[in-house]
Structures are given as C-alpha cells and as structure tokens.
Amino acid sequence: MNHKRVERIWRQEGLKVPSRHKKRGRLYLNDGSCIRLRACWPNHVWSYDFVAERLKDGTKIRTLTVVDEYTRECLSLRTGYALKSDNVMAVLTELFTTRGIPDHIRSDNGSEFTAHSIRQWLTGLGVKTLYIEPGSPWENGYNESFNGRLRDECLNAESFHTLKEAQIILEQWRHHYNHIRPHTSPGYKPPAPLTRMKEGASAYAPAPSFMPIHTPLCNLNTGPTNGG
C-alpha cells in the first residue's frame, strides 16, 4: 500500500492529511558538519544560553551559562528568578572586565540576547553576534553540550530549597568543572587547571565553601588567648 492510497483513505474517512513540507538543504563541510565559525583561540568565540530549573517548592529559576568554545571553560553560571537582557548585560560586563572582550558571541534568538540595547552595546564594543537558525540548537553545540552535562551531573542530582542554595551549589560545580574535572578535548585535562603539574603528578583543589570563617577563641595548647 503506497502513500497515495493511504491519503485517499484518510480523506474518505474525513481525516486531515498532513501537508508536505519542502525539504530544506544545508551547507556542510567535507566531514559532514554544518558550516559555522569555529573557535581558534581563547576569547575567539563565546556562547551563552539559559537553563531552567525549579526549587523544591516549585518556584522557577533560570541559570545563564557562558562558555568559551575554545578552552571549554565555563566563564559564568548566573542564577536568578527572572533573568532579562539587563542581567545578561551585567554578566557580560563583569566578564569583559576580568576576561577581556571576545571577538564573537554565539546564542539562540531569545529576547534576552536579541534585545536592541544589548545588540547595540555589543556592536559598540566590537563584539560580533552569531545568532543560530531558529529551531536549530545543534548550531550552538558547545553550549548545548555543556548544558547537558550541567543537568546530568548537577541539576538532576541536587534538590534546591532556596535560590541561595542553588547559587552556591552551582558555583561549586563550576569550580570542579573548570579546575578539577578532566575533559577529553584538552587531552584529559581541566579547562583551567589551578596549577601546572609535572607529568604523573596529581592535585586536588577544594571548591569554595562560601561559609564564614570562624576564628578560634582559644589555643588548645596554651589555653584561652585572652588569658582568662
């Protein structure tokens, strides 16, 4: 039974026949990958996107993820209740000050990234925006891959009761991802190791605790420090 007979039967039964869509062609490289700007040095191409999550009570939160596509380093994880274009601009301002200004920045067509204010601001700084085709998340592959790891290794494994707790845990995970966790692309090394180790050596760098440092009130060997 061919498709024409199936469509005729559908019409006889009063069913709607799905309309045929013209196939869309794409440009590909010799290795089969889509043509896109590939990062060739640090700060060449950054990419950013949002990841949605909920607190224990069901409150929605969002995390802005910023990744350097060349080094694979996660530059920022900013978490809040409602992040808008102003929040995106604030995160980028902080990163531009501490990391330098990238040549390009890749994103989808979300309103937070395509707002006139942020596009005009980036253009004034000399940053070229790379917007992917709507409905084509694979064109932002590095960031999508990172977001998948973030969800598998952290978001799906943790239960957040407050926004502050989510911010602390996500920042600790980012520290581990950047400085400790080995990655295949850089030769099974972290994207931003804290120290350069000799061959065969290993090191462990503790994540930031974000807890207040308590000064001991007495010396265990000599007694109270105030002489009381």
Image: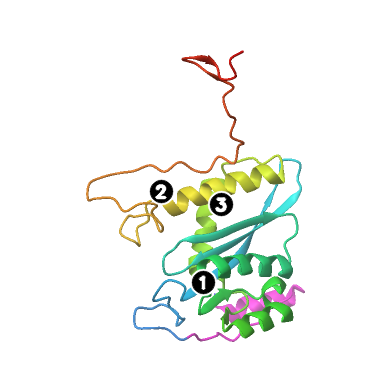
Work out whether residue 181 or residue 204 is closer to the camera in this orientation and state it: 204
Q: Magenta span has 10?
A: yes
Q: Amino acid at mark 3?
A: Arg
Question: Dots 3 and 2: beta carbons under 8 Å?
Answer: no
Report which residue position mark 3 lands on.
151
Name the image quarter holding residue 131: bottom right
CA separation in Å, label 3 and label 2:
18 Å
- Please name the residue shown 22% across and 46% down the image: 200
Q: Position of residue 223 (x, y in %)?
A: 53, 13
Dot in front, 3 or 2: 2
Report which residue position mark 1 lands on.
100
Q: Is residue 30 visible?
A: yes
Q: Is residue 155 visible?
A: no
- The magenta stretch spans which residues? 2-26
Dot in front, 2 or 1: 1
Q: Earlier in the sequence, mark 1 or mark 3?
A: 1
Work out whether residue 35 or residue 196 is closer to the camera in this orientation and state it: 196
